[in-house]
Image (tube, grey):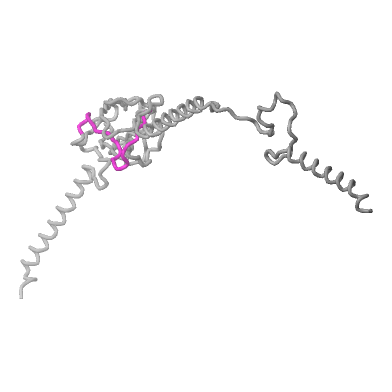
C-alpha cells in the first residue's frame, strides 16, 4: 500500500529530472562559456557571441608603405653618413687660408728650397744693406696659414725677426733692411754667421713637424759683417785676431831678436879668438 501511495510521487520526481536534463542539453559551451540558446529566430543564423573581436578575410594595412619609406630614408641617410665619413679622412678642407690634407705618415716633413741667394755657397752681406731672400716650399702637403721668418746669430745666440705672420705663397720672398734695423736695434747686428729660419706661425720654432707639415729644420746659412771707417795699417787692430800686434810692438820685437843675434855672434867670436873652446 505504501508503494502504491509513493508511486505517483516518484513519477513526478522522475519527470522533473528529465525536464531539467533536457534544458541542460539545449545549452551549449562556446569558448569555455555556458550560454543558453537564443529563442529569437532572426538571430539563428548569426554566429554566437564569444567576446572576441571578429576578423575579416582582407588583411588590414598597418602603414607598411610608410614604414618602408621611412626605412628607405634611414638607409639613404646612413649611406650618406657613411659616404661623408669615408671621404672625410681623404678630402682636403680649408679654413681661411689654412689647408689641411691627410697624408701618409711615412712621408717626410716639408721645408724650403732657396732660390736667392744660391744655396750652394755662403753669401756674405754688409750690415746696412738690404738683404733679399727668395725660396720655394718642398714636400708641403699641409700649408700653414702664416709663417715667421727670422735670422739666428751663432755668436750671441740672438734671434732677429725679419718678418712675422707672413702669408704663404708658392714662391716666397722677403727683404730685410738691415740699415733700418741696426739704427733702432736694442741688440745690434754683429760680424758673424747667421741662419735663416722659416717656420709655421702657429707653432714654436723648435717644434717637430709631422709628415707634410712645414719643418723649421731646413735652414740656410749666410754671413754678415759690420763695415768700419778707413784706418792706416799701423793703427789697425784686428778685432777677431786675439794675438794681433801693432806696428810699434812688431818693431820692438824685431829689435830684440836682432840684439840677441848680435850678442851671440860677438860672444862666439871672442871665445874662439882667445882659445876658450880649444882643447
Quadrant hosting residue 58: top right
Residue 99 shown in magenta:
yes
Quadrant hosting residue 221: top left
The number of numbered discs placed on residues in the rendered structure image is 0
Image spot of residue 52 (x, y percent) = 66, 33
Judge whether residue 182 can be spotted in this image. Answer: no
Image spot of residue 189 (x, y percent) = 33, 34
Image quarter in which the C terminus is found: bottom left
The residue under the point 20% across, 46% down is 250
Towards the viewer: 157 or 257: 157
The residue under the point 16% across, 53% down is 257
Q: Judge left or right: residue 151 versus residue 254.
A: right
Towards the viewer: 38 or 168: 38
Q: Judge left or right: residue 40 versus residue 110.
A: right
Stretch in magenta:
98-118
Image spot of residue 190 (x, y percent) = 31, 36
Image spot of residue 206 (x, y percent) = 37, 41
Quadrant hosting residue 17: top right
Judge whether residue 218 can be spotted in this image. Answer: yes
Q: Judge left or right: residue 167 versus residue 224.
A: right
Residue 187 shown in magenta:
no
The relative height of residue 234 versus residue 67 in the rendered view (above or below) is below
The relative height of residue 275 versus residue 65 in the rendered view (above or below) is below
Towards the viewer: 191 or 150: 150
Towards the viewer: 94 or 140: 94
Amino acid at each position: 500500500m505504501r508503494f502504491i501511495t509513493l508511486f505517483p510521487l516518484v513519477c513526478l520526481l522522475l519527470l522533473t529530472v528529465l525536464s531539467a536534463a533536457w534544458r541542460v542539453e539545449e545549452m551549449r559551451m562556446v569558448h569555455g562559456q555556458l550560454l543558453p540558446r537564443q529563442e529569437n529566430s532572426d538571430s539563428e543564423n548569426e554566429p554566437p557571441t564569444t567576446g572576441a573581436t571578429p576578423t575579416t578575410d582582407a588583411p588590414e594595412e598597418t602603414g607598411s608603405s610608410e614604414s618602408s619609406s621611412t626605412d628607405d630614408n634611414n638607409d639613404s641617410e646612413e649611406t650618406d653618413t657613411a659616404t661623408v665619413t669615408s671621404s672625410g679622412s681623404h678630402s682636403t678642407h680649408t679654413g681661411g687660408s689654412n689647408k689641411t690634407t691627410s697624408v701618409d705618415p711615412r712621408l717626410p716633413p716639408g721645408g724650403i728650397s732657396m732660390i736667392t741667394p744660391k744655396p750652394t755657397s755662403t753669401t756674405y752681406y754688409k750690415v746696412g744693406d738690404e738683404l733679399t731672400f727668395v725660396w720655394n716650399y718642398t714636400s708641403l702637403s699641409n700649408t700653414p696659414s702664416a709663417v715667421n721668418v727670422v735670422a739666428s746669430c751663432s755668436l750671441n745666440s740672438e734671434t732677429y725677426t725679419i718678418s712675422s705672420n707672413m702669408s704663404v705663397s708658392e714662391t716666397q720672398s722677403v727683404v730685410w733692411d738691415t740699415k733700418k734695423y741696426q739704427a733702432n736695434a736694442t741688440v745690434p747686428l754683429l760680424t758673424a754667421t747667421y741662419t735663416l729660419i722659416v717656420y709655421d706661425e702657429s707653432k714654436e720654432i723648435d717644434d717637430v713637424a709631422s709628415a707634410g707639415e712645414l719643418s723649421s729644420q731646413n735652414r740656410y746659412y749666410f754671413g754678415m759683417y759690420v763695415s768700419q771707417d778707413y784706418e792706416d795699417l799701423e793703427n789697425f787692430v784686428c778685432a777677431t785676431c786675439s794675438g794681433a800686434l801693432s806696428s810699434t810692438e812688431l818693431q820692438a820685437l824685431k829689435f830684440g831678436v836682432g840684439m840677441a843675434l848680435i850678442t851671440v855672434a860677438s860672444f862666439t867670436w871672442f871665445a874662439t879668438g882667445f882659445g876658450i873652446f880649444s882643447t
